[in-house]
Image (spheres, rainbow, N blue to C red):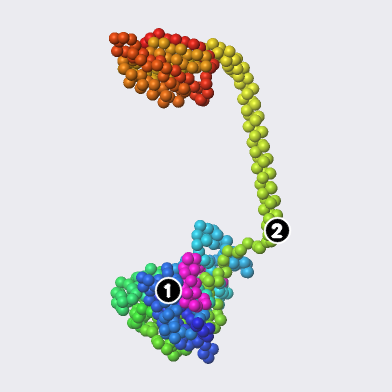
Amino acid sequence: MLGKRGMLGLAVTNRSITAVEVVPINGGGRASRSAELVFTDDLRLAEPVALGKALKQLLRREGFSVSRCMIGIEAGWLTARDKTLPPGAGESVTEILSLMIEQEFAGDRKDLVFDYSLETGADGKPAVLLVAAQQQAIDQLTAMAAAASLSAHGITVSTIALAGSADGAADRYQLVLHLFGGGAELALRAHGALGMVRRLPVPIPAGAEAEQPWADGHRLQELINHLRRVVALLPGAEPGSELARELLIWDETGLDPRTCDTLSEQLSLPARLCKRPEGLAPDGASRPAPGAQFSAAAAMALAALRGRPPAVDLLHSRLAPRKGLAIGKKVAWAAAVVAAFVVAATVLVLDWRRDSIEGTALQAKLDVMADDLAEANDVIAKVAFARPWYDRRPSYLDCMRELTLAFPQEGLVWTTSLAIQEDMRVVVSGKAVNESAVLDVLDRLKANPKLAEVKPLYLRQAGRGISEIAFAMSFTFMQSDGTWSSRNAKKSSSPRR
């Protein structure tokens, strides 16, 4: 378990984490330890737990002994906008900025975390900087710190921390340029108050490719062009103006003094390289790193060690959505019941009104159609009266149909008589060319579900010297519902066919 003496600064970029342990000394601080964890395919912010465990092992191996940490991120991970407050805003800054967020970030509000910097410069004018970062990135950083057994004191922006650590003068505009492997960022302090932070679109190589990043004159000229646009918008940029302006450079890329002089000449303002945050003891870390690689992490740790809250803290946002007022369960249930009653009553009234309107409209249609309805009812009565004269179908017709379907079409079997009684008991006799044809007819009759009690009565030669077979069989015809049919049944006979 790590100790709690001192403060740990963690500067997180897209490629690495630089860590500096700062301990108090003579009202300031001293960097007692420093280390760097370079990301790999397996160690990256998208896997915060694995990254935190690797960071914990590195800190133990390098002898770190603190557990409180201040985390800094790149300015490229966030959106920053300068805001102008209306006169007399006073203590309503949070409410005013919350309304601005609802208007500008309505669709993305739930995926972002917001905070702001409010400082008043030496000229008495308030400067408000609103920043927004992805909630997912903040959650990953807190998960990483937890996996490393660290207690996150806050999450800020590394470049903002560097801008607040320099010996800034209150009577001038300071451009704070932060150069590191992978990018360039710029912050503005106007009369001592933070007024801007942004990522400059200048590709700076990192890792093995970063040995001489400024040997390419094209990259340096691109940086100068972007800085020139910012300088041109500063107050006092007009010829003959006496407003002081300067460029402070925090460099982690090996920028030499000669290149620094080139920047100063091209931008027409003094420029100087910053070595360490103000208040940090000059003996540095026990294992010093080249250049100012650990300046951002040291600046954050030193400010937290002195009790200075960060200008922007995304872990403790002052613009977090307010939670609803807590109310008792009984009050909540009562409110729910009343709301349900009001809704139900409203629905019933609306249904009754709609039904009333529909009923009135239908009655009006019926009144218009009264003559047509009377004529239609008269036609229906006449049809119903006449239908029994034309719609009587004797049941024996269905019986004869089933019997006919059982006889083959080849003419091997024919009937000579057919008797159908009132209870639909049927006796049929006939002749056939052979016994097989008669037996086939008998099997078809037995297989018909509409016929019951199918049985042969006799099967013999039709006469001496005659090859024909005489037969007789009986069965009972059933209704479609399986009951015996007797309605409209009559005895009938048919001639030989």
Q: How dense is the environment of label 2, judged by Cα within 10 Å: few (below 14), some, or many (20 and up)?
A: few
Q: Position of residue 48 (x, y in %)?
A: 44, 71
173, above or below 400, in the image: below
The stretch of residues the image draws in magenta is 126-152
| Residue 149 among those drawn in magenta | yes
Q: Position of residue 272 (x, y in %)?
A: 41, 82
162, above or below 453, in the image: below
From the viewer's side, name the closer residue of 85 and 254: 254
How many discs mark residues in the rendered view? 2
**Is residue 494 among what the camera can see?**
yes
Q: Amino acid at mark 1?
A: Leu
Q: Position of residue 435 (x, y in %)?
A: 33, 19
| Residue on which disc 2 sits | 330
From the viewer's side, name the closer residue of 270 and 496: 496
Q: Amino acid at mark 2?
A: Lys
From the viewer's side, name the closer residue of 425 and 76: 425
Residue 255 image-quadrant placement: bottom left
